[in-house]
């Protein structure tokens, strides 16, 4: 499952990452820190600025709107940069 998600991430980002190895994707995009805030019906993950942020924003990750079932059906919001 992790491999499939890595491929999906690479496909959404494109820009040459379609053929990148999983460890490269992890290092550039996943292995980061974020401040997580749970308020009302929203879970917000605010990621610190990184060099690859423009690629994540261009791939529409900053507009993520998903329901997370395990914390009571709260909405997930990603804030990049």
Image (cartoon, helix red, strand yellow):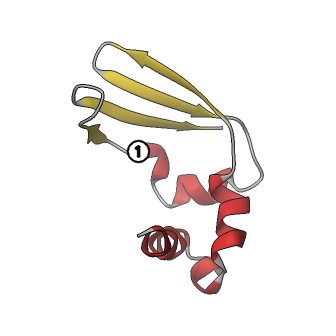
Placement of the N terminus among the 4 image quadrants: bottom left
Residue 61 x, y percent position in the rendering: 47, 51
Placement of the C terminus among the 4 image quadrants: top right
Q: What element carries label 1?
A: helix
Residue 4 location, quadrant: bottom left
Residue 23 location, quadrant: bottom right
Which residue does the numbered mark 1 point to in the structure image? Answer: 63
Q: In this view, does 19 lie to the left or right of 11?
A: right
Q: In this view, does 37 lie to the left or right of 25?
A: left
Residue 58 x, y percent position in the rendering: 54, 59
Q: Is residue 53 left or right of residue 13?
A: right
- Residue at horizontal 23 percent and vertical 36 percent from the top: 69
- Residue at horizontal 40 percent and vertical 26 percent from the top: 43
Q: How crowded is mark 1: few (under 14 residues within 10 Å), some or many (20 or more)?
A: few
Please state the total of marks drawn on the protein image. 1
Residue 15 x, y percent position in the rendering: 63, 77
Q: Is residue 57 left or right of residue 38?
A: right
């Amino acid at each position: 499952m992790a491999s499939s998600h890595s491929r999906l991430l690479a496909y959404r980002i494109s820009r040459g990452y379609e053929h990148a190895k999983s460890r490269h994707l992890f290092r550039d995009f996943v292995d980061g820190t974020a401040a997580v805030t749970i308020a009302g019906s929203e879970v917000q993950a605010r990621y610190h600025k990184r060099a690859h942020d423009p690629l994540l924003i261009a791939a529409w990750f900053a507009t993520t709107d998903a329901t997370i079932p395990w914390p009571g059906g709260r909405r997930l919001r990603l804030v990049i940069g």
